[in-house]
Amino acid sequence: MMDARKKKRKVLLMGKSGSGKSSMRSIIFSNYVAKDVRRLGATIDVEHSHVKFMGNLTLNLWDCGGQDAFMETYLASQRGNIFSDVAVLIYVFDIESREVERDLDTYHAIIEALREFSPNAYVFCLVHKMDLIQAEHRQRIYDERSAVIRSRSSDFTVDTFASSIWDQSLYKAWAGIVHKLIPNLIVIERFLSAFAKKINAEEVILFERSTFLTVTSVTSEVGELNPIYDRHERLSNIMKAFKHCAARNTLTTPASAGFVVMHTKTPQFNIFLGRFTDNTYIFLVVPPGEASYNCAVLNTMLAREGFSKAAAGSGGGDGFPLPPPETEEHANGTIGNPA
Amino acid sequence: MPPNETLFLESTTRIQKDSIHSFMDFQVWDFPGQLEYFESAFDLEDIFGSLGALVWVIDAQDDYLDSVARLNRTILTVQQFYPGINIEVFIHKVDGLSDEYRTDTFQDIVQRISDELSDAGYENAPVHYYLTSIYDYSVFEAFSKVIQKLIPNLSTLENLINTLANNCGFEKTYLFDVLSKIYIASDTRPVDMACYEMCSDYIDVIVDISELYSWDHPVRKRLGDQIQEAESHVVLHDQTMIHLMEMNKYLCLVSVIRNPEAKDKRGLIDMNCRTFQDALNEVFSRSWEEGSTAQAGGPATTSK
């Protein structure tokens, strides 16, 4: 039995005031769309929220208001409270900020505090609002900025991401973060790649159910040749947008809307999207071929049990319980007989 | 183009002709609003000669009296020389008006135009009115209606779709032009904005996903036989099913199915849609044979 504290990961979300912390939190975890975030006001002090992710993994998200006065209290009187037991620090830089040096000083102070109380935390830096930079300069400015950030990060290894709420880069960044947080990911990945080989899939992606973030993915040698590199993030975006549309038109909230199953067959590829475990969708891309597609779908449904056992066997796999059984019967796409 | 980007469009200064190549070829002529085309410098025959529909856009948020007066003049001229042209009036930008005010504006404009027309002695002029806005789907709906009037065998198509929808238990079925997401025919049940929105967004989903995975490479091999046209369906959380099937290069058939039993009979639905596809292509292949078009699709629908 795992102890309850371990399953709750404390995630600090920090950065200068107005850098977009609460906006991105709302988009990723509260089913907002980009234009809705205009309604958000400034965050006062720390907003705590618990985000259930992959079932057993609860992210305890501390959205820390970024105004200077708050920052000072975090570093002084609140220091022990804020920085102890941190699993992840996500620090957001506003690319448009005019006081780069000062931002970096604050960041460095935060890093020092983190080193004191939680030296094993992961640190992620998002260089945010990249949409405001002209496309041709983005890569260069981002590279420069992340080099400076690294130089001020003491002995933490920092992952940096360029992000914007207006395109898929936000998903890329958060999918990267989430990827780091999931326990026994290696077992899951090993299982998936063996499975992908068996069903001749070009690509198998596991999406988290409510956020549609990529949990993990396996790509075959052929699938690797796909020229579109940001396809996972684009898929997250596409499916989430459609989920919103479905919610709007079936009079329900985006949080409770979802898909039971999706089949797509085209002359170039076949795609299957379905509930895999309680918290994940599986997304299969297989080459065309009616019979082999149906086989792949059938096998996926059979693999679900094996998968949740494999994950459970290695300890802490109760993040992948099976969905309630009533959704299972739509798995098989066999052709009905004309009456 | 998303609606909020239209802000950056410049005002039209000359006649822009856009050709749309789809199942039928259209040419859209975009006229500058300030142009006085009844001056002798313009050749009326050139402008109106081969015209199918005249779309007149009225800004409902502005003072529209002037625009209505000009529209009346235009209608009278067009009616006199080219009585076959459909006149479509879009009362536009209604998103900014309250519901009540919207209806008032609509009635006022309709009243003014029909008064003028009956004064001039045209009782049943082909004038139609639509409330539109770019911020929802109403403008697609309106354009769909405009295009539908230009399709010679619309009633055949509608009959075919009705037969299909009734036999398969579809709630609503649309035949979409994939590129413009205008629907060129639908079953004759009342229009449901929610259904339209979901169908049109589902086309987006499929088109976008296809873009990600349709790359060409010699090592990509197929694993067996499969029908050439794309087919897709999704089941939503409330057991609603959206079913999409490619009909030909330009068209696809999208249906909303709420009957839970339909899901177990997908094979049958697929087969019926294929039958519909054959019928549809037959209608189009015969459309240039004079006369007998209405017959084309009739016997082919054997859906049960």
Image: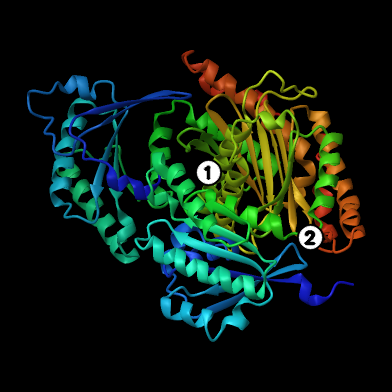
Marks 1 and 2: same chain?
no
Q: Nearer the viewer, residue B73 or A8?
A: A8
- Percent x, y of residue B184: 48, 34
What residue is rendered at 43% in x and 38% in y?
Answer: B144
What residue is rendered at 67% in x and 69% in y?
Answer: A119
- Tell me the quadrant of the picture where the C terminus of chain A can be found: top right
What residue is rendered at 37% in x and 57% in y?
Answer: A96
Q: CA distance from mark 1 to mark 2?
A: 40 Å
- Percent x, y of residue B247: 60, 28
Q: Left or right of B10: which side holds A326?
A: right
Q: Left or right of A97: which side holds A281?
A: right
Q: Residue furthest left?
A: B40
What residue is rendered at 51% in x and 49% in y?
Answer: B197
Q: Nearer the viewer, residue B176 or B130?
A: B176
Number of marks drawn: 2
Mark 2 belongs to which amino acid? Pro
Res. A316 image quadrant: bottom right
- Percent x, y of residue A318: 84, 64
Q: Is residue A298 visible?
A: no
Q: Residues within 10 Å of mark 2 (few under 14, many from 20)?
A: some
Q: Is residue B46 above or below residue B36?
A: above
Chain letter belonging to callout 2 = A
Badge 2 marks a residue whose secondary structure is: loop
- Percent x, y of residue A192: 82, 44
Q: Residue furthest top?
A: B289
The residue where tag 2 is placed is A183
Badge 1 marks a residue whose secondary structure is: helix
